[in-house]
Amino acid sequence: SLITNPQSWIPLSSPQHSDVSTIFPRWSTKFWSLLNSERKSILDSDDSGTAAKIPIEINNSSTTSSPTQTPFKPPAYPVDVNGRPIDLRDVNLLSFPVENDASIANLQTPHSGRKFRPTHPSCHVPSGKPSRFRSRLRAHWRQKRDEKKMRNGRSRKNNRRFTEGWYYRLTLPPPVNESFVFIFSIEDAGRWVREDSIQCDKSAISAESDGYVKATNRIQKLVRLLRPKYVKSPLTLACMQLLGSQDTYLVQSDEDDTKFWGWKFSQGYGCTFEWKNDSKANIVDGGHIAKEDFKMIAAMTPEEWSERVQSGFQILPFHLQGRLNGHDGTLGGVKADQGISGTAEFDLVIKPVAGWGNYPPLYSTGGAPLEQRSKGRKDYRQYSTAGWLAYFPVFEPHWQITMAHARASGFVNWNGTLYEFDDAPFYGEKNWGAFPTKWFWTQCNSFENYPDLAFTSGGGIRELPFSFLPGKRTETLGLIGIHYNGTFYEIVPWTGEMEWKVTPWGRWELSGRCTDKNGKNQFEAEIIAVTDEPGVLLRAPTKDKGMQYACRDSGFGSVTMSLWLLEWDNELGDFVRARGQVPLVDQARSSQCTVEVGGIPWNETWNVSSKMKQPMKGMVRLPYVVRGLVEKTRRSKK
């Protein structure tokens, strides 16, 4: 498991950082000195167990960037007075010091923080400040006030169905040739709904014989009619789903949403299903042994988490940890004791390579000189996957790629089989709001002879704003995002065109062009993915029934991808493939592409040309137009 060095963490209450205000506003040099402090990271698994051990040797020719690449050491997290990690808040990772790996700048994409409203007790206490009695009392009062508003149906923040989910994929190249998927979700956190079983029965009011009782019941029933009783949503659920060796499927969940915590500004969240018996939690305070309120514990150091958690998960910007003690997800439901029991454990250190934008090329990070790694850092800005309108509740659902390309080191223990690996391909994304009614999705970042190549593509039917108005209030959109040698190639309906032909299962044909003249390059891509595997049915949140079988997924798709630059042809009046140039990517192949279809089942080939309607198209295009004008102004000055 991952063992960190707590002595290298400097609590915010220490003399070196006694003034908290010098750390949080825009992260001063004191914070960076803390972040750059030396930490010792050790990946070591216990060989004394009975698990079968499978060490993974990554082939440098197909998946790594350079044989001389130095091991990745994640920076230390800022910690609170108890030595536990805290939210990175609005830290600007683009200003990361030169002494660190420049690829870390690509971790912080938009929407990395939580979108749901947490009910975990620690989220009501200001982070980074001592938990004094007055602060605890104020937080307790606010929590009770919010709960009362929700029970009475007066809270507008939690009165609609809401779900947020995170998806991660780990790829182990041949000869192991396995794929592991980690899916975490929270549904209806803190949501209260009207109790349908309590209704006013008018006939019962006149059925009472005693006048006093009759009048009393009449008043009570009228009050209930005017002010109905609210109960906690029956769809509230914290869930962990894992897809492992040979498309096997494990799941564990809990209906107590107060166990689920999340950071507001950066990617940090988790849920402890069960604590170890000896971890509740005797701590030494001034020489005295005091019992800590474990319900207030949110993020922990990786070492503390391993020692205290029996089952659950914790996701930090550079770490993924989890222990599942659940059952086979292909049998029964998602709740406990509904299938054949199964166990899994994972502990990963994550090195981000690309978010959703340009990034430092993989071959130049880790082993390149500092001046080469820091060159062009201003170009490493990350963007929203669905455009800047994703900051607002305009479309449903919302989608953000948080790590289009990354590297993972650590281990996965799947039902007693131990997989150890170093520098394996890794991917991460998230969704929030709701799922589309129909969709497809493909992803791969483990290509033969193309170590620095990754693509993600998806398409679906989503709702438009003001869906309550008459007429068709949906649109069908898709995109292709390609990261190659430090450059981000984005094909979206507001800067080009995309088409797809997807069968109910087995074949995905995707093509698209970016013809936006405001961009630096115009390009075209073609992707064909096929699979003979039956795949596995996975659960996804639905509108009225909660977690239900809604999609089919497999990590064993065979994919071929090509990418060309385009040039303008005056005779044709259109963009064509650049003459005399070889493709940027020529028939890149992989047998480890993830493929998926979901939503409403269909029996015919889904053939769509993705088009975005006005005025939304013009609004989403606005930042691209502005960037184009700024770029032209800079060129004219030079």
Image (tube, helix red, strand yellow):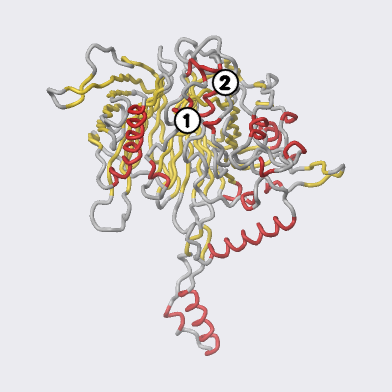
Q: Is residue 193 left or right of residue 633?
A: right
Asked if 96 appears above or below 206 in the picture, the reply is above
Q: Secondary structure at mark 2?
A: strand
First reached walking from the N terminus: tag 2 or tag 1: 1
Asked if 561 appears above or below 11 in the picture, the reply is above
Q: Secondary structure at mark 1?
A: strand
Asked if 121 appears above or below 581 in the picture, the reply is below
Reading the image, the residue beneath label 1 is 403
Q: Is residue 440 left or right of residue 408?
A: left
**x, y (%) of residue 136?**
70, 55
User: Quarter of the image holding residue 596?
Assistant: top left
**In this view of the protein, can residue 344 be seen by the observer?**
no
Looking at the figure, which quarter contains the C terminus? top left
Tell me which amino acid carries mark 2: Tyr
Reading the image, the residue beneath label 2 is 419
**x, y (%) of residue 251?**
52, 37
* Mark 1 neighbour class, 10 Å CA radius: few under 14, some 14 to 19, many 20 or more: many
Tell me which amino acid carries mark 1: Met
102, 448: nearer the viewer: 102
Looking at the figure, which quarter contains the N terminus? top right
**x, y (%) of residue 220?**
52, 79
User: Quarter of the image holding residue 7?
Assistant: top right
454, 311: nearer the viewer: 454
Please say if the residues under marks 2 and 1 sit with CB atoms less than 8 Å apart.
no
